[in-house]
Amino acid sequence: MWSGFSAKAGTRLFVLWALLFGSAFAVSAKNLAVVTPAASRVDSVTLAELAKLAKGTTKTWPDGKNFTLVLKDPDSDDMRVVVQKLFGMSSAELRQLAAKLNDSQPGHSYIRFVSSDAEVLQAVQGNPGAVGIVDVYSITSAVKVIRVDGKLPFDPGYVFKAN
C-alpha cells in the first residue's frame, strides 16, 4: 500500500469523486413530458395511440383536430429515446417520414422539428391539435402534461425517460 495513504483518506476521496462525477451522471437522465395546449381536452393517451398519430396511421384526434407533433432535433441526446420508442426507427428515417407526411397535407406541418424546448412550447400552445415532447423543467402554464399509458413523467415505468 502507498505510504501515508489511509483508509479514511480513501473513503474521503471516494466520496469526493461520487459528489463530483456521480451527480454529473445523475443529471444526464432527463424526464420528458408529452404536452398539449392548456385548453386541450386530451388528458391521456396510450403509447400505441400516440405512435399511430405520430406515424400518420391516424391523422386526426377523435374530435377531428389535425394532429401535429413538435419535437426538438431528433439527433439530440434526449430525443433519441423518443424517436426509438415512438417510431422505432433512426433519426434519418424519421426525417424522411416527416417530409413524406408533411408533403401529403399541403399547408399543414404534420411533424415539425424545432431547436429548443421553448420553441416546442410556443408551437404547441398555438395549435389546438399539437403535441410536443419537452424536458419537464421547461413546462409553462401555456401547456398541460398528458399521461402516456396512464403515467406521468416522474412515475415509475414512464416511457419517455431520456438518458
Image (cartoon, grey):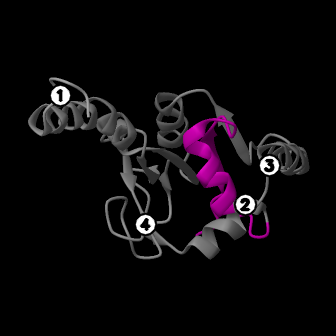
Q: Where residue 5 is drawn, which disc sits there?
A: 1
The reply to whether dot 1 and dot 4 touch (C-beta < 8 Å) is: no
Q: Where residue 94 is drawn, which disc sits there?
A: 3
Whether residue 106 can be seen here: yes
The residue sitting at the top extreme is: 4
The reply to whether dot 4 and dot 2 touch (C-beta < 8 Å) is: no
The residue located at (27%, 29%) in the rendering is 20
Taking depth in this image into account, of 68 and 62 the one nearest to the observer is 68
Residue 10: x %, y % from top left: 19, 35
Residue 5: x %, y % from top left: 17, 28
Quadrant in the picture for the N terminus? top left
* Amino acid type of the residue that numbered disc 2 sits on in the rendered structure: Phe
Q: Is residue 112 above or below residue 39?
A: above
The residue located at (43%, 66%) in the rendering is 158
Q: Where residue 158 is drawn, which disc sits there?
A: 4
* Amino acid type of the residue that numbered disc 4 sits on in the rendered structure: Tyr
Disc 2: CA contacts within 10 A as few (<14), some (14-19) or many (>=20):
some
Q: Secondary structure at mark 4?
A: loop
- Of labels 1 and 4, earlier in sequence is 1
* Amino acid type of the residue that numbered disc 1 sits on in the rendered structure: Phe
- Of labels 2 and 1, earlier in sequence is 1
Which residues make up the magenta segment?
A: 57-86
Taking depth in this image into account, of 146 and 26 the one nearest to the observer is 26
- Of labels 4 and 2, earlier in sequence is 2
- Of labels 4 and 3, earlier in sequence is 3
Whether residue 61 can be seen here: no
Q: How far is disc 1 from disc 4 in space, using C-alphas?
A: 45 Å
* Amino acid type of the residue that numbered disc 3 sits on in the rendered structure: Leu
Q: Is residue 101 magenta?
A: no
Q: Where residue 87 is drawn, which disc sits there?
A: 2
The reply to whether dot 3 and dot 2 touch (C-beta < 8 Å) is: yes
